[in-house]
Image (cartoon, rainbow, N blue to C red):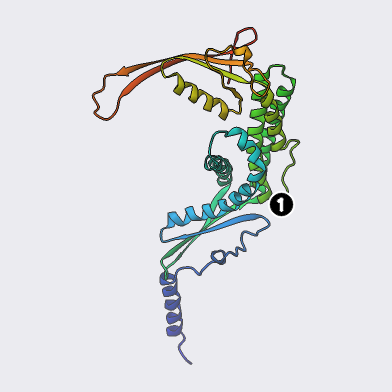
């Protein structure tokens, strides 16, 4: 009878050597297949790098790109809002605003992501990481956020429509439009995590709210600016740019002209932004630059009745 003990010892040693030097077998998720995290229940992202921590970051990024792509695809529907919100700014700056909105959603997305597995390819010296997001958990989080935003949007729209105060109307519509854009970023995320690809319908559309705001501003709350003191042209130019970026209409008027007689497209200004600017030189011995200190005091006055108004 042949002694089987040496054979068993050799086999056991061989298995031990494979375990020590070969590492665990290549998992299926490295190639995009994950039997433990089915596509109907999870979203996944795979990262790879020569460093473990970087591989994990890449896995997070791979999953986040899925959401960023969907948000960017919806951005064309928000262009009307961006034109009003970012007047006077370049297209690149409006693009930056979209990127900021995308970051809002990405941060929320990553709250629901975890690293589920790691693998090291000893032959190639490459680390792999698997990031996973449970669809049902993320869906609940997005729906809660959308519901919260919907309540705020409805309250702002109701306030804007009920108020007889024009400034309050503008504030309400602006807040509603801004929050509606944020709401739609979350809705884009919701469509990604739902296997059906369906989001939550909103009673309002971004272009409709911004059009209402645009039409109101076109014939209401026309501003005139009157600056006295030092560096009046520079101060007036800065104030005009700031108000235009807020979506407001500015009436160009010489300082000596009566405000009530000014007009823009047949409409007289309703509000006057007036103020006084002082500039003092600072004694700093610098061969290249001159330093100054400035101070400005401004108020918004309702032209009819000369009543001061708060504007925010």
Q: Is residue 215 above or below residue 272?
A: below
Give whichever of 219, 156 is nearer the camera.
219
Q: Residue at x 60, y 20 (%)?
A: 223
What kind of element bears circle 1? loop
Q: Residue at x 61, y 28 (%)?
A: 247
Measuring from the top left, give residue 85's x and y in whole percent. Answer: 60, 33
Q: Residues within 10 Å of mark 1 (few under 14, many from 20)?
A: few
Measuring from the top left, give residue 30's x and y in whole percent. Answer: 54, 65
Q: Residue at x 30, y 19 (%)?
A: 282
Give whichever of 145, 202 is nearer the camera.
202
Residue 228 in view of the camera: yes
Give whichever of 182, 293 is nearer the camera.
293
Residue lying at the far top of the rendered structure: 305
Q: Is residue 183 above or below residue 161?
A: below
Quadrant that contains the C terminus: top right
Q: Residue at x 45, y 84 (%)?
A: 7
Q: Is residue 201 toward the left or the right of residue 256 in the image?
A: right
Q: Which residue is mark 1?
A: 197
């Amino acid at each position: 009878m042949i002694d089987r003990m040496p054979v068993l010892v050799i086999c056991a040693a061989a298995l031990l050597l494979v375990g020590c030097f070969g590492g665990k077998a290549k998992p299926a998720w490295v190639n995009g297949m994950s039997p433990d995290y089915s596509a109907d229940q999870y979203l996944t992202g795979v990262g790879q790098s020569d460093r473990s921590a970087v591989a994990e970051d890449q896995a997070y990024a791979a999953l986040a790109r899925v959401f960023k792509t969907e948000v960017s695809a919806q951005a064309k529907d928000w262009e009307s809002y961006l034109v009003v919100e970012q007047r006077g700014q370049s297209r690149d700056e409006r693009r930056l605003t979209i990127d900021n909105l995308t970051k809002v959603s990405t941060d929320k997305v990553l709250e629901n992501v975890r690293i589920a597995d790691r693998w090291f390819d000893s032959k190639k010296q490459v680390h792999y990481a698997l990031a996973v997001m449970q669809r049902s958990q993320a869906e609940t989080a997005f729906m809660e956020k959308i519901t919260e935003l919907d309540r705020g949007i409805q309250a702002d729209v109701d306030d804007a429509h009920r108020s007889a105060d024009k400034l309050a109307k503008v504030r309400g519509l602006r807040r509603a439009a801004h929050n509606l854009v944020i709401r739609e970023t979350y809705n884009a995320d919701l469509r990604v995590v739902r296997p059906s690809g369906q989001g939550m319908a909103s009673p309002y559309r971004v272009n409709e709210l911004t059009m209402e705001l645009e039409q109101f501003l076109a014939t209401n709350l026309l501003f005139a600016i009157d600056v006295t003191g030092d560096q009046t042209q520079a101060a007036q130019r800065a104030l005009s740019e700031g108000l235009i970026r807020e979506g407001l209409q500015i009436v160009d008027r010489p300082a000596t002209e009566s405000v009530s007689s000014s007009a823009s497209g047949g409409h007289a200004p309703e509000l006057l932004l007036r103020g006084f600017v002082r500039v003092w030189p600072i004694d700093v011995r610098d061969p290249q630059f001159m330093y100054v200190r400035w101070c400005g005091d401004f108020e918004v006055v309702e032209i009819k009745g000369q009543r001061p108004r708060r504007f925010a």
